[in-house]
Image: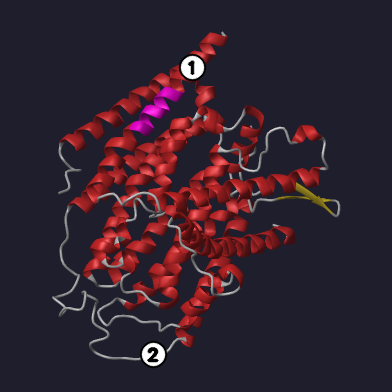
Amino acid sequence: MTLATALFLLVLFVVTLTVAAYSTYAERKVAAFLQDRIGPDRAGPFGILQPLADGTKMFMKEDFIPAAANRRLFTLGPAIAMITALMTGVVIPWGGELTLFGETFRLQGTDPEIGILFVFAIVSIGVYGIMLGGWASNNKYALLGSVRAASQMVSYELGMGLSIVALVMLNGTLSLGGIVEHQAAHGWNIIYQPLGFIIFLVCAFAETNRSPFDMPECETELVGGYHTEFSSMKLGFFLFAEYTNMFISSAVISTLYFGGYHVPGLDRLGLDPNLTTLIGTAAMFAKTFFFIFFFMWVRWSTPRFRFDQLMNLGWKGLIPLGIANVLITGTVYHLAELWKG
Amino acid sequence: MEPISTPHDYLPVLVQAAIAVGFVGFALSAAAFLGPRLHGRKKEESFECGIEQQGDARRPFSVKYLLIAILFVLFDVEVIFLYPWAVNFKALGAVGFVEMVVFVGFVLAGLYYVLRKGVMRIE
């Protein structure tokens, strides 16, 4: 690992935090827009300093722990949620190669062979954060919220894993950099995997506990769900982890199905390679921001599911559909091979 | 074939984890230090919508959640088995595909069985 990689990781960390912080602002502005309101407008022009105000408030609030809670796990829960949310960005390819001072850098922390499995592994650890936090609160609402969260997240992980299997069959690699390169050469995966994309998208909503699947923090039934007893930075981390996860999920969706940093026809223009890379990175962020907006759009347009509906959709809908998608993909591929001779 | 990744490739992952742990540790201790601290017996009770607290949350809850967790472990292992096959899908050819269809058939039969057994009947 070089100094450049270390610097890149630091920049990535700051960018992730900034995007997550401004997603909270964007969410309130999007909600306001969809509901014909103005939204936050007091902190700075157009309320642009709102995330800073919110962050400062989180620091200055009382760090309250209920007497009945398990103190160590109560702190560990939000910490795990936040740490896992910040860790997955390292394997996502944010751009191509950049040549500076005669050296070539890749705009990706690292590209292990098992990139997408690494993302799944870390996301699975995130379940522990919510589960521990809710259980340690020793509060009935928090307990119900956390067991709901755990069963919801593990159920939808299956559908998500199956939708990726079909994609990996066509791309022949688990490395995220490799998947983007394959798409640059053969066209974006969304063309070949529309069903897989829809399954993945629905599962991404459930994995990030976003509406319409936000039963774990369903305020009409469970007060605040798993974070009922949390305050100060601990509550902040749970909420912030949700926005960070939304950013990372959007980036993963763009990478897997929409060509990541690839822009069709850009290499044919004969631009400077560095400029091409920068346009690619801008395209990657544009795609990511679109999906973040999509997450918000859905949240403010759809009512919440009921828990049994959610479980039925996962186990009787998405998992069989995911398996069908694998079989269809394999059959179509082999028929096409036969056709070609 | 692409080269297999080396332990060297995972160093950035560890660095990223260290940054994340550092940030979380700093923010949690800073918040604990900066905020006010006030104690009170009523205040430190668990929240139950303002009514008197009835027992605590260390009580049995629906076994359905446990069943879902167990089923997840079963099916997730089966999905993981699909990954090495999926990576080599094109190299394995039609025979490899048919073999995997048989495996997937067993998985589907298992899924059908647990659904018919009513594991998902949550009311």
Q: Which residue corresponds to the image point at 25% horizontal and 29% vertical from the top-left?
A: B109
Which numbered marker is on residue A137? none
**Chain letter of disc 1 in the image:** A
Task: Indicate whether residue A205 is drawn in magenta.
Answer: no
Q: Look at the image and tell me whether residue B47 can be seen.
A: yes
Above or below for B91 versus B45: above
Q: Which residue corresponds to the image point at 29% horizontal and 80% vertical from the top-left?
A: A66
Q: Residues within 10 Å of mark 2 (few under 14, many from 20)?
A: few
- Are both tags, 2 and 1, on one chain? no
Relative side of B117 to A137, left or right: left
Query: In this view of the protein, which residue sits in the foreground, A226 or A291?
Result: A291
Quadrant of the rendered image containing residue A266: top right
Residue with the most extreme front position: A36
Which numbered marker is on residue B37? 2
Q: Give, as a single range, the part of the protein colored magenta.
A: A321-329
Type of amino acid under label 1: His
Above or below for A320 versus B119: above
**Chain letter of disc 2 in the image:** B
Q: Residues within 10 Å of mark 1 (few under 14, many from 20)?
A: some
Q: Residue beneath label 1, please?
A: A334
Give the image location of residue A270, x and y in percent.
Answer: 82, 35
Q: Would you say the magenta stretch is mainly helix, strand or loop? A: helix
Query: In this view of the protein, which residue sits in the foreground, A326 or B52?
Result: B52
Q: How many marks?
A: 2
